[in-house]
Image: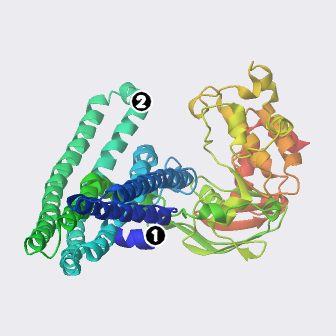
Amino acid sequence: MWIREALCDPPPGSRTALLLTWARTLALAGAAAALGAVLDTALAGRSTAAPAALTLALVLLAAAAGAGAEAQVGQMAGETETGWRERVMRSALGARRPDDESAAGDGAGAEAGHGTMLDAATGGVEKVAAYRSGFLTPTLAAFTAPLLVLAVWAAVIDALGALVLLVAIAAVPPLIVLGDHVLRRSNGQFRRAQSQAAARYLELVEGLGTVSVLGAGARVLADYAQTARGAMRELTRLLARNQVVIVVHDAVFGVLMGCVAVALVLAGFDNGRIGAGQAFTGILLVVLLQEPMGRIGRTFYVALGGRARRDQLEELTADVSTTESTGTRRTPADDTPPSIDLRGLGVDRAGRPVVEGVDLALLAGARIALVGPSGAGKSTLLRVLGGLEEPARGRIHLDGAPADAAVRRRRCATLGQHIDLLSSTLEDNLRLVAPDADGSRLTEALHTAGLAPDLRTMPAGERTVIGEGGALLSGGQRRRLGLARLLIQDRGLVLLDEPTADLDRATERLVRERLAVSLQGRTVVEISHRLHTTLDADLVVVLVAGAVVDVGPPDQVRSRPGYYADALAAETADDPRLREGAAR
């Protein structure tokens, strides 16, 4: 219910907007009373200068208060939109990455595609901001302001008439609750259908080239048309119910109360209880009493659309707190290499466990190699360590203290299989995580990641535009830019998922030598399918079918029968250079 939300969870700055709106209404009501005094003094043949000046002053005060209220609402809208957009982006880039296969699960965010997230981050956020800032507080002010009008009515015209009108106003909240109950379900159904249609369209545009090459254009267009028709059907049902509710509100609050108010004025004037000036003031106050209905007419659909979109965004970003930004402020202690303690860790996918019973104690500053066959749960475990999702069971401690997802994200730097890059420049991608880094830090990170030779071939250097998602870079260059972005963060916990997967052997060897120096002393957890790169690790953790089956230094694990020994032997046999190294 919007009234509860406006009272218990208003946007920041709403109190100021509410007070300014009340001041405007009170000033206008006072101006109406002053105009009545102008009429009475004119009819009596006296000077109207004093009441006219008071009227002008009150009108100017009302105009200033109204302008202030509108400016405050605009500021609230900007702040609300920024906050929600940040929340959606944190969810899309963090715990709910829809294009990450390892993130697939049974939650709403796991089902959200690129189109859904893009629609949420644009149209969805705008509608929520309009609802939270442009509807909640202004509408609450509009529905409470008539009480101030009635107070002026009681003081200037007739206390009994004000009491009668108060009874009529008291009937409005139950009508609003009834209308909300009637429309909530159909509105939610329409917004879901509209969001699905928008997401389908955005995904169709994004994948237009692939669809054309595969010859699936006709079928995909037909699917989109069916989704759009479903949204239109829901819209038709919603509009029909909306009109019924608006008519009822108009009839009860607008017509009925307006007629009662005018009748009270005319009756009082007819029997001589009130004078001409008071009757004129009463007619003007009726106009102010009608303002709530005008507010409903202007913002009715803003409320319906905004509430449904808010529910959608709450569902999509359920794992990201709206106040997380205050809880993720970094401290110097966050950059120290932590020890990691996992006990009884379990992660589920679609109702079945994919990681189960993981117990690990990892020393601070150690390099840990996480190995195992494809589908063993390595990437899932790395996501959990990085705070990109919470486990279904078990606990995670860093340096002996419980660490939730926000704490783990704050303390680690992660390089996953998929590198998310801005479409602007190399420098912009580094400053995304290190906005205050000077030129020497940028150069050092790019050099360590092995991008220095490539930079020398780029006329614009670090200011080279890399295209959407790094499309103008090779796969190896994208990987090395991701490495540079990881290194410049200077975190104590580093999580790597195949960090040199797209690099040739020579570049891989060079980058690994530099990483060994740069990451010295940090706690590093690395997934690698090139097992020869794990031989210099401090600890090898073997994961098979979601369970840890072996742990120990590389030489010890290699000496025992199992996946690590078999896979390492097969890799050595397949690569002549590794065979020569093993022989030496």
Q: Amino acid at mark 2?
A: Thr
Q: Residues within 10 Å of mark 2 (few under 14, many from 20)?
A: few
| Marks 2 and 1 close (CB-CB < 8 Å) | no
Left or right for 184, reference 464 = left
Residue 462: image quadrant is: top right
Q: Residues within 10 Å of mark 1 (few under 14, many from 20)?
A: few
Residue 265 x/y as whole percent: 14, 69
Q: Quadrant of the C terminus?
A: top right
Residue at x 35% of width, y 57% of height: 55
Q: How far separated are the C-alphas under marks 2 and 1?
A: 45 Å
Q: Quadrant of the N terminus?
A: bottom left
Left or right for 394, reference 534 = left
In front of the other: 112 or 1: 1
Residue 144 appears in the rendering: yes
Residue 174: image quadrant is: bottom left
Residue 68 x/y as whole percent: 47, 54
Look at the numbered disc 2 and give the secondary structure of its residue. helix
In front of the other: 15 or 365: 15
Q: Amino acid at mark 1?
A: Asp
Residue 326 x/y as whole percent: 65, 64
The circle on residue 225 is none
The circle on residue 210 is 2
Left or right for 298, reference 462 = left
Residue 311 appears in the rendering: no
> Outermost residue toward the right?
584
Q: In this picture, is 423 found above or below 565?
A: above
Residue 509: image quadrant is: top right
Q: Nearer the viewer, mark 2 or mark 1?
A: 1
Residue at x 42% of width, y 48% of height: 126
The circle on residue 9 is 1
Q: In this picture, is 432 found above or below 385?
A: above
Residue 291 x/y as whole percent: 27, 60
